[in-house]
Image: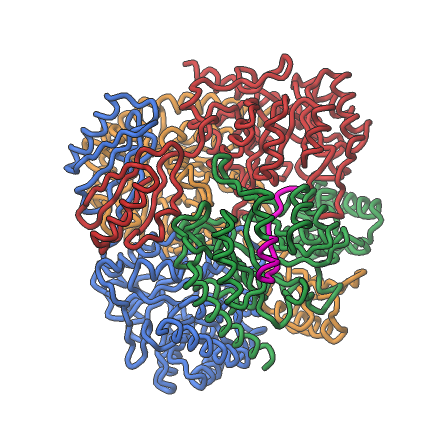
Chain colours: A blue, B orange, C red, D green
Amino acid sequence: MLIVMKADATDRDIDGVLDVIDHLGYKAHPMPGATRTAIAITGNQTSVNPSHFENLPGVLEAVSVTKPYKLVTLDLRPDKTVVRVGEATIGGDELAIIAGPCAIESRTQAFAIASAVRRSGAKFFRGGAFKPRTSPYAFQGLGEEGLKILAEIRDVYGLKIVTEALDESGIDLVERYGDVIQIGARNMQNFSLLRRAGKSHLPVLLKRGLSATLDEWLLAAEYIMAEGNYKVVLCERGIRTFAQHTRNTLDLAAVPAAAHLSHLPILVDPSHGTGRNFMVIPLARAGIAVGADGLIIEVHDQPERALSDGAQALTLEQYEQMVNEVRAIHDVVQLAAVG
Amino acid sequence: MLIVMKADATDRDIDGVLDVIDHLGYKAHPMPGATRTAIAITGNQTSVNPSHFENLPGVLEAVSVTKPYKLVTLDLRPDKTVVRVGEATIGGDELAIIAGPCAIESRTQAFAIASAVRRSGAKFFRGGAFKPRTSPYAFQGLGEEGLKILAEIRDVYGLKIVTEALDESGIDLVERYGDVIQIGARNMQNFSLLRRAGKSHLPVLLKRGLSATLDEWLLAAEYIMAEGNYKVVLCERGIRTFAQHTRNTLDLAAVPAAAHLSHLPILVDPSHGTGRNFMVIPLARAGIAVGADGLIIEVHDQPERALSDGAQALTLEQYEQMVNEVRAIHDVVQLAAVG
Amino acid sequence: MLIVMKADATDRDIDGVLDVIDHLGYKAHPMPGATRTAIAITGNQTSVNPSHFENLPGVLEAVSVTKPYKLVTLDLRPDKTVVRVGEATIGGDELAIIAGPCAIESRTQAFAIASAVRRSGAKFFRGGAFKPRTSPYAFQGLGEEGLKILAEIRDVYGLKIVTEALDESGIDLVERYGDVIQIGARNMQNFSLLRRAGKSHLPVLLKRGLSATLDEWLLAAEYIMAEGNYKVVLCERGIRTFAQHTRNTLDLAAVPAAAHLSHLPILVDPSHGTGRNFMVIPLARAGIAVGADGLIIEVHDQPERALSDGAQALTLEQYEQMVNEVRAIHDVVQLAAVG
Amino acid sequence: MLIVMKADATDRDIDGVLDVIDHLGYKAHPMPGATRTAIAITGNQTSVNPSHFENLPGVLEAVSVTKPYKLVTLDLRPDKTVVRVGEATIGGDELAIIAGPCAIESRTQAFAIASAVRRSGAKFFRGGAFKPRTSPYAFQGLGEEGLKILAEIRDVYGLKIVTEALDESGIDLVERYGDVIQIGARNMQNFSLLRRAGKSHLPVLLKRGLSATLDEWLLAAEYIMAEGNYKVVLCERGIRTFAQHTRNTLDLAAVPAAAHLSHLPILVDPSHGTGRNFMVIPLARAGIAVGADGLIIEVHDQPERALSDGAQALTLEQYEQMVNEVRAIHDVVQLAAVG
């Protein structure tokens, strides 16, 4: 922490700050400058709460320096985490593709899509049984019935099941029927849910919140890891900005930014990240080009009949085209990393 | 819903859209224009899902018209809701003030502050027992111990207790010890929590999410009301923007905007809405001037020792000054409304 | 500036940073901490460019401390600036009201409105002769013809004329016909225009850009002052955010934030700040309640016939009501400041 | 335009709206629905101003349908524009790379970088002679001296010169010394400058403003085209959002979104779009992967000594690596488009 004093701060003001630093058990380093004094703080084990200082007389601002996370950071673990789900991996050399419908609507629909996903070589199937919907009157998912269909797909096609849990009892169900717990953007700071996920043996796919900073997102992962579950996969899915030509603004710079600080693997979701069918393939390519470890993608056999989010689902043909294109780009990026 | 066709859409494209409208049981109204055709849809009871149309050949865009809420709206109930908590009210002529510390830290602290709150004439006391903290390593509140202190304050000072629930079991506890369930910004779209709150007999204070649109916020209230609990109070507490001079950007226009659509009362939280002590009183004045029904305010007897959010808490002296100023402004606004 | 080193930075990395600091003529203060070293820089007269450091080996980040402005700041001039325009003032005890139509459309329209503005006791008349319009096909203003009408209004009603200049030749014209040069939000970082305004003898009303930080806004004022014109008035007019219930999000916290750093007076523009008629009066009240020195307001005798921005213009009756309400609130705020 | 009436609008309210539509010379199409009436407007040649309707009694909202641009749109010109600068092109099959330093600092610096740019096969050299700087005290560029160095580089290396004009007299100078006029983000709505650029015979590179919507950006291009200059190149360079891990948020979805509406070519600027060296190559790859026609990139021989924006400049080695990677990705995208 660095405490910046006002230009007209008195010696008494400075002494007041030094007293509080001392009282908190830290070490103060006052540095008089041309126009004002700054006081650095060392000796703290975790980040210092700026509110101890911001209202003291003569203080202009308190600037945080130490990052508040421990387990997510490269400082702790310089090698990248590879999350294993059976023989499939996320974060290694393999391009991870998680594909499927937004919501499980019926056994027929789910099987038609799963068959195409399997054919494409993807190893993960996604599909919502419990859907977080903005309106209470919108389709909320098939519930446990949907999970049973997903479990069948796992048995028939050998695909690993990624599905969202909305609450603690939802995690119990995913543990029974699925392979990876998805935590959605709206729940990124549902701390009770994060703690419960931290006690699970299943990997957790943690979507970035609509207005989450990188620090907040990494700290949400830290909540899960602090409970003992180190199998966390980050997922950039678009943030909320003033722009109206997409449903969300896909922030692809978050991929190298997260990799700069953390060992956790990271996926990109171009379906929710754009919300418009014609943008999904271009942004899927961009997501792999920027260095993501994989994609989570909405595919539907009949997008115009979809009960939720049809506007962004790829048709089976589009999905196949996308897989070919992103594989070619993944090869370029892999080669670049080696070379 | 209005479907806008591309300039080069063919008759066949238009027929395709008409077919889907017909298939959905709605009525189509095609309107050829100078450069393009638009097709209006009527006959829908709820809002139409644009994804049925956006990817059809020849469609440029699908524009929603019907608002997706029913119970929160002035269409249903043109008179403003007054939420009663014992003899105290929110939404009527009386200025509602909810004041207290961010977190309950000790009995001594809570009582010192409650005494000042009582003296000011405010009828509600706030204080967190379960704190949603960005970092898992930050102070998380005293838990049930904190709620017991709050219950004592109710008994001693006759103040109504407003306190946050983070999960469904948290609501059980607030029902035991408190008077108003607070749902925080991070949980505004925690739909399981909203549904549980909708089954409570207690009023619910619903904070706006950091990146929630007005529609999303009203639909979160709709989730609660759809379960039968009509005692919902909205609370504007700042949104996330690029601006860095405040912790959040207090969006005071949300107050008249919400009142334009909904009968629910609305409060302003200038403490979280700014995050900086010297801005709280000015924005509290502005919140009442814009027409809010009251304020929720953080007060602390020793802000520089606060375990959370000290930077924004008012001292007891500042709090007293604020109450005087906002009462004078409330009088001006009331007079204006009558005159 | 504070340079924060990575946890695994080597002694050689640290020496590299110290060399660059030395090379730039500053003084380095290395501070080894528990997990990482930070290096403070002093001896700089202006703010240090972080790009000198950010890519050096071992550097995690470079945090700016010194504020980059000199003339706008309270450090230089602790007393608030009062801008005088004849006998009218902005920034003193008097509430400044600038009212008039968005654009001058005709002599009849302008006189009808000016008469009402005069009657209200306001001392400034606003009206655009050159309009910055998003579309090249929208009404662009009457040009010099409009300025001549404004000059007539000054003569007839004794109102001071505030009008926008879009380019350097526009400032020549405002100097001929007007009293205060308005620089619009879109031109806040048109540095050629700012420099030209800095050479004028007229006061400058500087609107905040749609996405301007407080620092950028104050530095735009600094551009004007650096050329010798100290008569700058800031104006908050709303920022661009994700929120869609208003045209812009009026950031009222910017008023105390600017006053915390700068001696310049500050106005609020609730017309552009909301873009919707029914919100203008509430936000005008809030602007004065938060501590602004005055308002700039759009008034029209026939809003539904206005050639630009009719949606936000007050009718003459609404305007009169607003003036009464904000005067009453101004009294409360003045009293509070004294008391 | 679609006028949506309130649920409680009276027949008289509806007649009032019909009268105004009639008065404006348009055709009204009232459509009574289950809960409210909507009225569509046809017969308008340009977009209808919503302010004619928004404050009429009984009106809930006025929804624009017709897009307000004519020349930029695919409706006018379905084939993509290829901008030719001598034998170089932007918008055709060729990948356009514009590289060079942020600011021209000296002849030695500029030549060292130009030599590497030439070697890479890029056909355009960028470099600022007039720099728009947030602070009046920061380095403002070498002015005409810088332009002379650029003209020499054109002669020696055969590179086309892209350089920024800050005002109308700046365009005169670019016309004398350069090949492409760059209009920066801060000037995207400097309409006097846009009109002057529209009268130039040189192509114009139009950067997106920090908070510009897609419509505003396309309308800025429309300003240039409306004056007769059809050689406009769009450039996405990042928008301002709450995210702090980058200087701006590069909105790559703007590339397919612009291509969906307009025939103009579009570049991506990953240097300003991220502001951090380690992100530039990944985002350059992503920009080409998403379908951009090329890149504008900052390169410096000694980034840590750069007088402006050193933090984001690639070293010569990094630049070479980037060119190889984006060429490989461009091949994949081209192949995908054909296939």
Closer to us: D323 or C4: D323
Question: Where is residue D62 shown, x and y percent of the image?
Answer: 68, 49
Question: Where is residue B282 shown, x and y percent of the image?
Answer: 44, 27
Closer to us: D38 or A201: A201
The C terminus of chain B lies in quadrant: top right
Whether residue D276 is visible here, answered yes or no, is: yes
Closer to us: D284 or C101: D284
- Left or right of A76, for residue D160: right
**Number of marks in the rendered image:** 0
Which residue is found at the position 60% from the left and 71% from the top? D94
In the picture shown, does residue B220 fall above or below D283? above
The N terminus of chain B lies in quadrant: bottom right
In the picture shown, does residue A236 fall above or below C2? below
Question: Where is residue B92 shown, x and y percent of the image?
Answer: 48, 32
- Left or right of B179, for residue C71: right
Question: Where is residue B285 shown, x and y percent of the image?
Answer: 46, 27
Which residue is found at the position 50% from the left and 48% from the top? D106
Q: Quadrant of residue B22?
A: bottom right
Which residue is found at the position 43% from the left and 44% from the top? B231
- Left or right of A144, for residue C32: left
In the picture shown, does residue A168 fall above or below B56? above
Q: Examine the structure image and report whether residue B141 is included in the region drawn in magenta.
A: no
Closer to us: C159 or C144: C144
Q: Quadrant of residue C191?
A: top right
Q: Magenta stretch?
A: D151-167
